[in-house]
Image: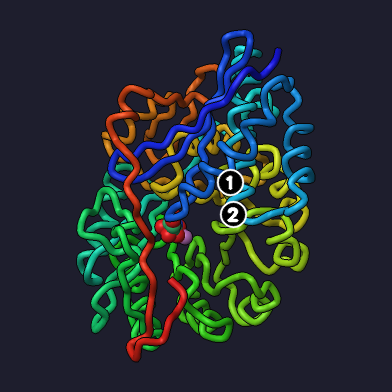
Amino acid sequence: MKITEAKVIITSPGRNFVSLKIYTDEGLYGVGDATLNGRELSVASYLKDHIVPMLAGRDPHQIEDIWQFLYRGAYWRKGPVTMTAISAVDMALWDIKAKAANMPLYQLLGGKSRSGVMVYGHANGDSIEETVDEVGKFLNDGYLAVRAQTGIPGLKSTYGVSKDKMFYEPADSDLPSENEWSTTKYLDSIPKLFDTLRNTYGNEPHLLHDVHHRLTPIEAARLGKDLESFRMFWLEDAVPAENQAGFRTIRQNTVTPLAVGEIFNTIWDCKELLEEQLIDYIRTSVVHAGGITHLRRIADFASLFHVRTGCHGATDLSPICMGAALHFDLWVPNFGIQEYMRHSEETNAVFPHSYSFKNGYLYPGETAGHGVDIDEKIAAKYPYKRCYLPVNRLEDGTMWNW
Ligand code: EZ4
Ligand code: CO
């Protein structure tokens, strides 16, 4: 089999998605997600201008060789743009290989290790009371795990809290909007939220929280300690992780489980965190960490250190990524949990898929390939719209991490 051509498709059914479609001389094609929230066109250009011209004529079955060719061959390694582009190619090639084998992708990875993929939903509210109610709605819908984010009294906006409870979408403006942050106010509120949640729903539901890179290691250690009795499933992105050694401070001071890595691109970003057993869950995703080929490598390395997977699955990761992730999750031996934010009706129409939700679990379905396609006619109805993630400032105006 030979690759004949590849095409980049940009669509915006409520938010921007970049996809790659790879065609072969045997009539089979594969699709990959290439969406990098707020920086979409740079990946589209990387693919169109620099990768697509090199694909024609290659054997799509040589997934590993093509991955190595694109990674080593760029000379300029790593980085979110490069790795998202490589991920898209990798996802599309696995899709083709599984279609050629006439098998769902998880079979090629090694088959099922479990019956379904436990997911967590996103509950949020302006106040603790509202957030507690929203968590209850997810539990009523069958979710076994829920992430809870709440508005902080005295701050005009907070990460993870939206007006539209169904489709929380952080990229909200054609120029970055500004959020406001106070560590003191935040550290005061969050333990109260989880205290109320445990008092209301008991210890059975898994509860998660995303700090979204806003604390320093010693502050994160304080929060981890304050949350200990509420038995969190995880505390996510407690600090920005460029400084991997910073996690030692958190780790030495709390038994609250730690998750990190949704913005990581390669195994090198998590090497120290894994080797030193500084985290419990690795959040690297199929779309931003080198596709199935590289994510599998990260997960295998993580398994040596008791670290389980918890793939990023926000709405800016397209249904193509979600489909591929579910096959990975169904197979990966050291699976932890999968994030699931739910896409809009418009997005689901652009990306018809075979995965489905039931009683807290997602199932990838039995369609050959990863089970997600792109309807180009519907996609064409939604042109690209420039859209940025917000930025964050302290109350005195100092730039902070968003
Ligand atoms: O802010 O995907 O855990 N989920 C998250 C997401 C991220 C967005 C950024 O594009 O942190 O909401
Ligand atoms: Co996150």
| Residue under pointer 2 | 80
Answer yes or no: is residue 206 visible: no
Element on which disc 2 rests: helix
Q: Quadrant of the C terminus?
A: bottom left
Residue type (three-letter) at the residue carrying disc 2: Pro
**Which residue occupies the foreground of this view, 269 or 127?**
269
| Residue under pointer 1 | 84
Residue drawn at the location 34% of the way across and 91% of the way down: 396
Q: Quadrant of residue 257?
A: bottom right
Q: Position of residue 154 (x, y in %)?
A: 24, 84
Residue drawn at the location 62% of the way across and 32% of the way down: 52
Is disc 1 in contact with disc 2, using a CB cutoff of under 8 Å? yes
* Image height of 374 relative to 28, above or below: below
Q: Position of residue 29 (x, y in %)?
A: 56, 18
Q: Position of residue 42 (x, y in %)?
A: 52, 49
Residue type (three-letter) at the residue carrying disc 1: Thr
Mark-to-mark CA distance, 1 and 2? 6 Å
Residue at far bottom of view? 396
Residue at disc 1, CB closer than 8 Å to ligand 1? no
Q: Position of residue 10 (x, y in %)?
A: 41, 37
**Which residue occupies the foreground of this view, 56 or 152?**
56
* Image height of 357 relative to 375, above or below: below
Residue at far top of view? 26
Answer yes or no: is residue 367 visible: yes
Does residue 306 appear to the left or right of 386 in the view shown? right
Residue drawn at the location 40% of the way across and 30% of the way down: 356
* Image height of 393 relative to 121, above or below: below
Q: Quadrant of residue 360?
A: top left
Residue drawn at the location 29% of the way across and 61% of the way down: 124
Q: Residues within 10 Å of mark 1 (few under 14, many from 20)?
A: many
Q: Quadrant of the N terminus?
A: top right
Residue at disc 2, CB closer than 8 Å to ligand 1? no
